[in-house]
């Protein structure tokens, strides 16, 4: 039931309540050890907020975040710092995420320094990490602007791995990169996952990348989870009309296979005053009177979990 509301910059109406942005509302999901959960949706759907909540860079307005059964949402100070080594985040733009005055070595070593690693161990660990992400030792003395986008993302990954985390949250890790470099980073992530038994949350608006890397996929719309299923199920048999529309826009892997592209009408409504009932009703081709007033609950049905009053047919 993860919920995150932010105070909005919008002006408060006379005497009215301060407007809030409903960034994430009542999202419930679990991660399986060793999986890659793809978290998808258009920009502004709340997927980045969920990823920051998961690693406790943000504090939820409501809800719990359990890691090994412990609620990290309620943790503070030293307890949270100890817990934090278990989960790390890699951001989209490696350039803005990295401190420009830090050399490659400093960047990778910073988490080790904070953890109080001694000098000798630190240098050995930094060299090991650099080789694991496919950079050369000579890269350690360079600064972020001297690296290519792909190399910077490798640095960001090395840094995230420094303290041997078990969960990596990857927030649009390849979206800023050229397609050929994207493939290299996706392959690197696959190798590292196998090697270190990592669990990934892979956040992306790009379903063709998610199709490549994810084992399960969660779809968000306007701050809520609308569908969750294994990758094959989700792509071949989406039950939620929004998922269907998203998938219809992905180029098919097999040329010649036909699919009608579904173009949604209108824009995503404001998260300051999301529509009543189903939040997707203003754009949904299947919307009924019921959808305008009654909030659909996420329910498991066959191989999919979805939140919709009038789901698409299940495949035979
Ligand atoms: Fe569309 Fe209604 Fe389903 Fe919402 S609940 S996705 S409006 S059919
Ligand atoms: Mg984002």
Image (cartoon, rainbow, N blue to C red):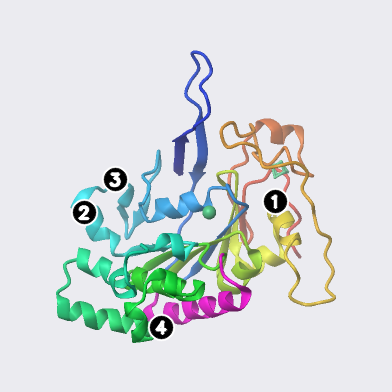
Q: Which residues are magenta?
A: 176-198
Indicate which disc, 3 or 2, sits on the residue closer to the N terminus: 3
Residue 50 shows in the view: yes
Q: Residue furthest top?
A: 15
C-alpha span from label 4 to label 1: 40 Å
How far apart, in angstroms, are the residues tagged by discs 1 and 3?
Answer: 33 Å
Residue 307 lies, in percent from the top left, at 62, 47
Please tell me which of labels 2 and 1 falls first in the chain.
Answer: 2
Q: CA distance from mark 2 to mark 1?
A: 40 Å
The residue where tag 3 is placed is 74
Local crowd size for mark 1, using a 10 Å CA cut-off: few (<14), some (14–19), many (≥20): many
Mark positioned earlier in the residue sequence (2 or 4)? 2
Depth check: give the residue in front, 84 or 29.
84
Measuring 46% from the left and 58% from the top, which residue is drawn there? 30
| Membership of 159 in magenta stretch | no
Q: Nearer the viewer, residue 122 or 242?
A: 122
Q: Are marks 2 and 1 in contact (CB under 8 Å)?
A: no
Q: Which mark is residue 242?
A: 1
Q: Earlier in the sequence, mark 1 or mark 3?
A: 3
Q: Which residue is mark 2?
A: 79
- In magenta segment, residue 193: yes
Residue at 30%, 84% in the rendered image: 128
């Amino acid at each position: 039931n993860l919920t995150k509301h932010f105070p909005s910059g919008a002006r408060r109406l006379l005497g009215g309540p301060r407007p809030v942005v409903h960034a994430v509302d009542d999202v419930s999901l679990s991660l399986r050890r060793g999986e890659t959960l793809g978290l998808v949706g258009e920009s502004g759907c709340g997927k980045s907020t969920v990823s920051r909540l998961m690693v406790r860079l943000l504090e939820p307005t409501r809800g719990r975040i359990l890691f090994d059964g412990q609620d990290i949402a309620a943790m503070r100070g030293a307890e949270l710092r100890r817990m934090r080594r278990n989960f790390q985040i890699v951001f989209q733009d490696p350039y803005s995420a990295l401190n420009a005055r830090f050399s490659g070595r400093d960047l990778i070593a910073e988490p080790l320094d904070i953890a109080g690693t001694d000098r000798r161990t630190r240098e050995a660990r930094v060299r090991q990490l650099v080789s694991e992400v496919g950079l050369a030792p000579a890269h350690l003395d360079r600064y972020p602007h001297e690296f290519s986008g792909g190399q910077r993302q490798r640095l960001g990954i090395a840094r995230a791995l420094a303290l041997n985390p078990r969960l990596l949250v990857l927030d649009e890790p390849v979206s800023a990169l050229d397609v050929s470099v994207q493939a290299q980073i996706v392959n690197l992530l696959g190798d590292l996952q196998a090697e270190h038994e990592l669990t990934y949350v892979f956040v992306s608006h790009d379903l063709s990348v998610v199709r490549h890397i994810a084992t399960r996929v969660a779809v968000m719309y306007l701050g809520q989870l609308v569908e969750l299923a294994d990758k094959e199920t989700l792509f071949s048999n989406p039950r939620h009309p929004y998922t269907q529309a998203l998938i219809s826009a992905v180029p098919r892997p097999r040329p010649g296979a036909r699919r009608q592209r579904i173009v949604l009408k209108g824009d995503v409504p404001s998260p300051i005053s999301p529509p009543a009932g189903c939040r997707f009703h203003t754009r949904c081709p299947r919307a009924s009177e019921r959808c305008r007033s009654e909030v659909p609950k996420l329910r498991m049905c066959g191989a999919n979990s979805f939140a919709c009053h009038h789901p698409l047919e299940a495949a035979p």
